Amino acid sequence: MTASREIALKVEGLRGGPFGADVLKGVDLEVHHGEVVALMGPNGSGKSTLLHLLMGHPDYEITEGQVWVDGVDVTGATVEERSRAGLFAAFQYPTELPGVPLEDLIREALTARGRDAEDVSVDEMARQIGMDPALLTRGVNDDFSGGEKKRSEVVQMEILRPSIAILDEIDSGLDVDALAASSERIREIAGQGTGVLLITHYKLLLDHVPPTTVHIFVDGRIDRSGGPELAAELEEAGYK
């Protein structure tokens, strides 16, 4: 079976979890190019497990199902192969890489994707999101504040221009101004054709980045789906 290239991300019947445990219990999901889809759910429902399985985390195993990026089956691909296929993830708790300057990481990633790294003004993109360009010369996320780490993730996303960007609680740790700047960048990249999957607990992010679809994740599966009004209902009534 194949997936259309009009679909940035297609997930079908996905099961799995850490060391092969079936935390996910059959997830079906689609994100089209230029579309913003929100995934909400209580703590421990499996949202971050989904992200780790999609990115090929070595401690997580897909036991059943398939994943496509731009119509290419990446179910058994390495992390590097998934990234080159156009999959990008911004993590809730970004990893620190002392000694690896952030700008060097970005330019190496651009080169690995066959793009000319010298044509990209990393400094300017950092300034646009309110990030101090001096951080570009420091180790990736090394002694960054929570907000600086999230700004760094958004800068990387905007520069790399992936087919599908999965953002795990990108709003966590951001102040009001940083949330507005980050949201503007997310809307911009979606407008240029990137599919965006937003994993969040809060309607506030979705007020800034309106989704076409909201999925409620419960006990390792999508329990309910709807439009933006579903997030408003959730805020008022809670998951129960």
Image: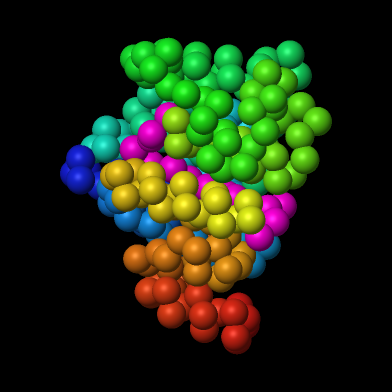
Q: Nearer the viewer, residue 48 or 187?
A: 187
Q: Does residue 171 belong to the magenta stretch? A: yes
The picture places residue 13, in percent across and down from the top left corner, at 37, 52
Q: Which residues are magenta?
A: 160-176
Residue located 43% across and 13% down the image: 118
Q: Nearer the viewer, residue 56 or 86?
A: 86
Q: Does 73 appear above or below 28?
A: above
Left or right: 144, with 164 as reference point:
right
Point out the residue furthest to the right here: 143
The picture places residue 202, in percent across and down from the top left corner, at 60, 67
In the picture, the quarter occupied by the C terminus is bottom right
Task: Using the rendered image of the protein, determine whether residue 76 is visible from the camera's viewpoint.
Answer: no
Left or right: 181, with 215 as reference point:
right
Q: Does residue 166 belong to the magenta stretch? A: yes
Residue located 39% across and 17% down the image: 119
Q: Nearer the viewer, residue 122 or 157?
A: 122
The picture places residue 140, in percent across and down from the top left corner, at 68, 25
The picture places residue 83, in percent across and down from the top left corner, at 43, 27
In the picture, the quarter occupied by the N terminus is top left
Left or right: 141, with 30 as reference point:
right
Residue located 24% across and 37% down the image: 71
* Count of residue discs: 0
